[in-house]
Image (cartoon, coloured by chain):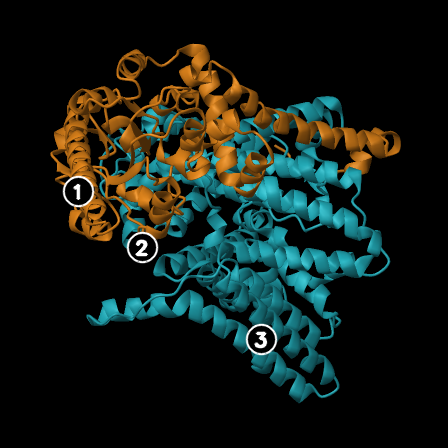
C-alpha cells in the first residue's frame, strides 16, 4: 500500500462551487436547516405533552390524572387532602370519609408538581368550591425542604406545560436548560415508545376512580430499604406561610409528615428535623407497607395511614367542639353577669 | 461547562454568538472583550472559586511578560524573570496536580497513618499553564511580542481550547485577534463551524460514550480477566479514547471557526499511523509540537553542546553508532516522553506510559537508522498492514498504563491480555443504562447487568472507520495533506453547504440529542 501523502486542496478549492457560487444566503439557509430541525424536534415535545393522550402514554402513574386536581367544581368537600406523592398514594379519601362521616377529596400531586406549580391546584379548587372544614397538607420529609431542586422534574413540567404554558413556563424552561432538555426528550421518547406499546396502568386507573384520588403504584411491596434518603433542612417558614394562607374560621389546617419505613437509617434525624413543624409524629411503618422509593405506600399501607388521619381529624373535631362548648359556656356566664 | 451539555448548547453558545454578532459592529475591542468575558464565565460555571486561580495565573504571567519585555536589553534580568515566571507556573501546577498524590505515595511507602489531605484539580490547569510558559519563553527569546491585556486574556482563555486544548501557540492565534480584520459573524464560517461541531458531538455522544461502560468496567476490575475480556476492554478503551478526543478536538475547532478563528488541527487519524513517530505526529498534535519545541529541542541542544565540549561529533554519522544514537536520539526522546507522561498525571502508571512511548519512538528511530529499507526485515515491516497493526497494538499496550488507576491494575490487565488467566468468556458487568421511563427512574438507577461480548464486539465495526475513511477535517476540506488513497474518497464525500448536508447533519444532531440525556465528561479533562 502506498504511503505517499499528497497535498489536498483547501476547503474552498476542494469544493470550488461552494465559495464561488454559494451565496451568503445559501450559507445562512444551511445554518437555519441545521439548527431549526433539531429545535423543531425538541419543540415537538410541547404538543406531545399537551395532547389528551399523553397521560396514558407517559408511563408514569403520577401523570395518569394530571388535570384531576383542577377539575373539581362544586364538590364542596369537608376534608380536603393536598400534598405531594405521599399524600396521593397514601391517603384514601373514601376510607377517611367512611371513618369520619365527612366528605373527603384528595387533590394531592407529586412532589415535582408541588415544587413547580406550588399550591396552584389547591387555589383553583378553593375558587370553585366552598372552603373545607379540614385542609390536610401531607408531605414526605424531603418536600419540607421546599427550595430543594432534588425531584423528578418531568412530572411538574408536564402539569405546567398542560395547565400554564405562558411566559412563566417558558422562563422556567429557559433558565433550567438541563431539566427542560431532559423533559423534552422524556416526552418524545415516551411518544415513540407508545408506538410500540402503551403501558398497562389499568389497575391504578380503576383504583383512582373508585377511591376518588388514591393512586396505587403497580409494584409489589418492598422487602428492604434500598435508598439512603437525602434530607435537606426543613423550611418552617414555608409551612408557616401555608398555615397562615389557608387557615380561617371555617378551615383548620393540618400539616402532616408521611410515614417512613422502620428500616430507614435516619429516622431520628428526620423526626427531630420536623419537631414543631408538623401536627403528627413521624409515622414509622414496616417496609412491606411500602411499594416504591421507600415512601409510596401499598393499598394496605394507605388504609393504615388513612385510618390514622381519620382518628387525628376526629380528635381535632372533638377538641374543636370542646373548645366551642367552653366558649359558649363562658359567653353565657358573661351574659348572665350583665 | 461541557460542550455536550444542554446548558452549553441551548444557552451559552447562542448567547455568545448573538453577542459576537451584535458587538462586531463596535469593532475589535468590543468583540475581544466579549469573548474574553464569555470565556471566563465558561470556566467559572464549573467552579467559580477556581476563576480566581485562572485570573491569578493570567495576572502573574502578564506581569512577568511585561517585566521580560522591559528588560529585553538586559539578558541577565530577562533570563531571571523568565525563570521566575516558569517557576511560578510550575509551582502552581505541582501544587494542584502533583503535591498531594506525591504525599499520598510517600505516606503509603513509609507506612505513615496521618492524613495528607487533597485538593481538587482545577480544570485545564495543564493547558493554560503550558500555553503561558510557552509565551514567556518565546517573549524572552524575541519570538513573541507583548499584547494588550484583554487580547492576552482571550489568548489564554478562549473557551474552545481552554479546558483540553489544542495547546495554542501565540503566533497562530494572536494575529487572528489583531486589528484590521472583520469581526462580524460570517455565514460560511458559522456553517462550517456548526458542521464540524456536530460531527464532533456525534463522535462523543454516539460512539465514545457508548463504548465507555465496557471499558470503564474492565479497567475498574482488571484482576483475573481472560484474554477475550481484557482485549475487548482494551480495544473498547482505545476506540473510546480515540472518538472522545477526536470528538472534543472537532468541537473545539468547529466552535472557534464559528467566530472565524482557526485553531490548529490537533487530531489527525492517529490510528492510520504505520509507525510510532507518525502516531505522535497525528495524536494530540499540538502537545507533540509543544514537547518538541520546549522540551526535546532544548534537551537535545544541551546534549549537543556537552558532546561538542567533550570533542565528540554531533553529525548524522555519529547517530549511527550505538553510543551516539543513545546520547543524541534516545536520551532526549525518552526524557521528553518521560516528562510527557508526568504531564498527563501524577502516578507511576503515567511515568510508565510516557517512558514506554519514549522507548517506542527511540526503537522506531533505531529501526530507521540501523535497518536498511531494502533488507528482508525492512521489507517485511515496511508492509503497511503489518506496520499499522503493530503500531496500533503498541499504542494499546501503552494505553493500558494510561487508563489504569495504578501500575498494579495495569500489569494485572496485561497479564489477562497475554493469556495468563485463560481464554474465558466475557463476564464483565456494568451499570445498565437508565431508560426514560418512570419505572426505570424510580427503581434501577444503578443496577448491574451483564455486558455481552456482542455488545463489546461492536468495537470491531469502528476499525474500518478509523483506518480507511477520511477524517472530519478531510471531509470538511480543512486538511492540508492526506494519504493519496484517501483523497479520491474525500472528493466523493466532501462536505458542501447543501440542503442534503444540512438535513443529514441535522438528523445526526437529533440522534445526538436522543442519546445525550446523560452528559459525560471528556477523558482529556483530567489533564
Q: Quadrant of the N terminus of chain A?
A: top right
Mark 2 vs 3, N-terminal side: 3
Classify 10 Å Cα crowding around label 2: few (below 14), some (14-19), many (20 and above).
some
Residue B307 image point, x, y percent: 57, 77
Which subunit holds the residue at mark 3?
B
The residue indicated by pointer 3 is: B302
Residue A174 image point, x, y percent: 57, 39
Q: Report the residue that reaches farthest toward the front.
A: A338
Residue B348: tell me if it is visible.
Answer: yes
The residue indicated by pointer 2 is: B406
Residue A170 is marked as: none
Check disc 2 and report its element: helix, strand or loop: loop
Q: Nearer the viewer, mark 2 or mark 3?
A: 2
Report, in whole angstroms, how far the alpha carbon at label 2 lies from the one at label 3: 34 Å
Classify 10 Å Cα crowding around label 3: few (below 14), some (14-19), many (20 and above).
few
Instruction: Identify the chain drawn in orange.
Output: A
The residue indicated by pointer 1 is: A329
Amino acid at each position: 500500500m502506498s504511503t505517499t501523502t499528497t497535498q489536498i486542496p483547501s476547503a474552498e478549492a476542494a469544493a470550488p462551487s461552494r465559495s464561488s457560487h454559494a451565496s451568503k444566503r445559501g450559507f445562512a439557509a444551511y445554518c437555519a436547516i441545521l439548527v431549526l430541525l433539531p429545535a423543531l424536534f425538541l419543540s415537538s415535545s410541547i404538543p406531545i405533552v399537551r395532547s389528551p393522550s399523553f397521560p396514558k402514554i407517559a408511563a408514569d402513574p403520577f401523570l395518569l390524572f394530571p388535570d384531576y386536581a383542577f377539575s373539581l367544581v362544586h364538590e364542596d368537600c369537608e376534608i380536603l387532602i393536598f400534598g405531594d406523592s405521599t399524600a396521593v398514594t397514601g391517603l384514601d379519601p373514601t376510607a377517611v370519609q367512611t371513618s369520619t362521616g365527612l366528605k373527603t377529596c384528595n387533590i394531592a400531586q407529586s412532589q415535582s408538581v408541588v415544587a413547580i406549580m406550588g399550591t396552584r391546584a389547591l387555589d383553583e379548587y378553593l375558587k370553585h368550591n366552598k372552603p373545607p372544614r379540614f385542609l390536610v397538607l401531607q408531605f414526605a420529609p424531603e418536600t419540607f425542604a421546599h427550595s430543594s431542586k432534588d425531584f423528578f422534574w418531568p412530572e411538574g413540567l408536564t402539569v405546567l406545560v398542560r395547565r400554564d404554558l405562558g411566559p412563566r413556563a417558558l422562563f422556567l424552561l429557559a433558565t433550567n436548560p438541563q431539566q427542560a432538555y431532559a423533559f423534552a426528550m422524556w416526552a418524545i421518547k415516551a411518544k415513540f415508545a407508545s408506538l410500540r406499546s402503551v403501558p398497562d396502568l389499568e389497575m391504578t386507573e380503576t383504583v383512582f376512580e373508585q377511591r376518588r384520588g388514591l393512586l396505587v403504584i403497580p409494584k409489589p411491596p418492598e422487602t428492604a430499604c434500598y435508598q439512603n434518603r437525602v434530607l435537606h433542612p426543613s423550611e418552617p417558614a414555608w409551612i408557616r406561610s401555608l398555615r397562615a394562607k389557608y387557615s380561617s374560621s371555617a378551615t383548620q389546617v393540618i400539616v402532616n409528615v408521611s410515614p417512613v419505613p422502620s428500616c430507614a437509617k435516619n429516622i431520628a434525624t428526620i423526626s427531630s428535623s420536623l419537631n414543631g413543624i408538623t401536627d403528627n409524629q413521624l409515622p414509622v411503618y414496616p417496609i412491606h407497607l411500602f411499594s416504591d422509593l421507600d415512601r409510596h405506600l401499598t393499598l394496605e399501607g394507605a388504609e393504615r395511614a388513612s385510618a390514622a388521619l381519620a382518628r387525628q381529624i376526629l380528635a381535632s373535631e372533638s377538641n374543636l367542639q370542646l373548645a366551642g362548648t367552653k366558649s359558649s359556656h363562658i359567653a353565657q356566664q358573661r351574659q348572665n353577669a350583665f | 461547562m461541557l460542550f455536550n451539555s444542554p446548558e452549553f448548547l441551548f444557552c451559552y453558545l447562542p448567547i455568545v454568538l448573538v453577542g459576537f454578532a451584535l458587538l462586531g459592529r463596535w469593532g475589535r475591542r468590543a468583540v475581544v472583550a466579549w469573548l474574553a468575558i464569555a470565556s471566563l464565565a465558561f470556566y467559572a460555571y464549573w467552579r467559580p472559586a477556581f476563576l480566581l486561580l485562572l485570573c491569578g495565573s493570567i495576572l502573574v504571567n502578564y506581569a512577568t511578560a511585561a517585566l521580560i519585555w522591559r528588560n529585553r536589553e538586559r539578558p541577565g534580568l530577562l533570563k531571571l524573570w523568565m525563570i521566575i515566571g516558569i517557576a511560578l507556573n510550575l509551582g502552581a501546577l505541582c501544587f494542584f496536580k502533583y503535591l498531594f498524590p506525591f504525599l499520598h505515595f510517600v505516606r503509603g511507602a513509609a507506612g505513615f497513618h496521618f492524613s495528607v489531605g487533597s485538593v481538587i484539580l482545577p480544570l485545564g490547569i495543564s493547558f493554560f499553564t503550558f500555553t503561558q510558559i510557552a509565551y514567556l519563553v518565546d517573549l524572552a527569546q524575541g519570538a513573541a511580542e507583548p499584547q494588550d491585556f484583554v487580547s492576552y486574556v482571550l489568548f489564554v482563555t478562549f473557551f474552545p481550547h481552554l479546558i483540553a486544548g489544542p495547546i495554542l501557540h501565540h503566533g497562530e492565534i494572536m494575529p487572528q485577534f489583531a486589528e484590521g480584520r472583520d469581526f462580524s459573524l460570517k455565514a460560511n464560517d458559522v456553517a462550517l463551524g456548526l458542521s464540524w461541531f456536530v460531527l464532533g458531538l456525534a463522535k462523543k455522544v454516539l460512539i465514545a460514550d457508548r463504548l465507555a461502560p465496557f471499558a470503564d468496567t474492565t479497567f475498574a476490575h482488571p484482576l483475573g480477566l481472560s484474554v477475550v475480556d481484557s482485549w475487548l476492554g482494551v480495544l473498547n478503551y482505545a476506540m473510546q479514547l480515540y472518538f472522545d478526543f477526536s470528538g472534543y478536538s472537532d468541537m473545539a475547532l468547529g466552535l472557534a471557526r464559528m467566530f472565524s478563528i482557526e485553531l490548529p488541527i490537533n487530531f489527525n487519524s492517529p490510528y492510520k499511523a504505520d509507525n510510532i513517530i507518525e502516531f505522535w505526529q497525528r495524536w494530540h498534535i499540538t502537545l507533540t509540537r509543544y514537547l518538541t519545541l520546549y522540551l526535546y529541542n532544548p534537551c537535545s541542544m544541551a546534549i549537543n553542546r556537552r558532546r561538542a565540549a567533550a570533542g565528540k561529533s554531533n553529525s548524522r554519522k555519529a547517530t549511527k553508532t550505538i553510543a551516539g544514537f543513545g546520547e543524541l536520539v534516545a536520551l532526549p526522546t525518552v526524557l521528553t516522553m518521560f516528562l510527557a507522561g508526568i504531564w498527563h498525571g501524577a502516578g507511576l502508571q503515567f511515568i510508565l506510559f510516557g517512558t514506554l512511548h519514549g522507548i517506542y519512538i527511540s526503537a522506531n528511530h533505531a529501526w530507521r537508522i540501523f535497518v536498511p529499507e531494502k533488507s528482508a526485515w525492512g521489507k517485511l515491516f515496511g508492509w503497511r498492514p503489518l506496520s499499522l497493526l503493530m503500531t496500533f497494538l503498541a499504542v494499546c499496550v501503552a494505553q493500558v498504563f494510561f487508563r489504569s488507576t495504578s501500575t498494579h491494575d495495569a500489569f494485572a490487565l496485561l497479564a489477562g491480555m497475554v493469556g495468563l488467566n485463560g481464554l474465558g468468556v466475557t463476564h464483565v458487568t456494568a451499570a445498565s443504562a437508565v431508560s426514560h421511563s418512570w419505572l426505570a427512574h424510580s427503581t434501577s438507577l444503578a443496577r448491574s447487568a451483564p455486558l455481552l461480548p456482542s455488545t463489546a464486539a461492536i468495537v470491531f465495526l469502528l476499525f474500518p472507520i478509523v483506518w480507511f475513511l477520511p477524517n472530519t477535517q478531510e471531509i470538511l476540506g480543512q486538511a492540508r495533506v492526506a494519504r493519496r488513497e484517501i483523497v479520491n474518497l474525500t472528493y466523493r464525500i466532501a462536505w458542501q453547504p447543501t440542503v442534503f448536508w444540512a438535513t443529514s447533519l441535522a438528523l445526526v444532531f437529533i440522534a445526538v440529542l436522543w442519546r445525550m440525556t446523560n452528559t459525560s465528561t471528556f477523558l482529556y479533562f483530567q489533564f
